[in-house]
Image: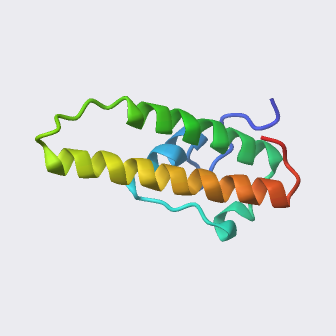
Amino acid sequence: MASGGGSGVGGKSMKAVANDVGEGYMTINPLVLKKFDKDMIKELYEHLNKAMAAARNIAVPLTDQIAMRNKNMKLQRLHNSIIILRNTAREKRIPL
């Protein structure tokens, strides 16, 4: 694979980037994605989807409103990043 363990943002792996996006420490926008090559975009897309699945599987009691809000915010951040990534990939003609 062309993008080995060294690919990422600021020395972080794409998995760490996806986790940071979910936690709100980083945002994905067209300016950030401008520096990404085809393999990096595909890898980030894969990790964002994995993080989304993991966030969906978090069991939160319906009575714990703060935990529910945190889960929903995480899902929203990941979803928005995936949408932006898909649009950027489509513009660059990168199949995902």
- Where residue 67 sits, quadrant-wise, is top left
Q: Quadrant of the C terminus?
A: top right
Which is more toward the observer, 13 or 22? Answer: 22
Q: Where residue 3 sits: x, y (%)?
A: 76, 38
Asked whether residue 21 is in view, the answer is no
Tell me what residue is drawn at x 84 percent, y 43 percent: 95
Q: Quadrant of the N terminus?
A: top right
How was this image coloured? Answer: rainbow
Asked whether residue 46 is in view, the answer is yes
For this orientation, the residue located farthest to the left is 63
Q: Where residue 2 sits: x, y (%)?
A: 82, 35
Tell me what residue is drawn at x 69 percent, y 39 percent: 43
Which is more toward the observer, 51 or 12? Answer: 51
Residue 35 higher or lower than 75, as above or below? below
Tell me what residue is drawn at x 86 percent, y 58 percent: 92
Residue 24 higher or lower than 50, as above or below? below
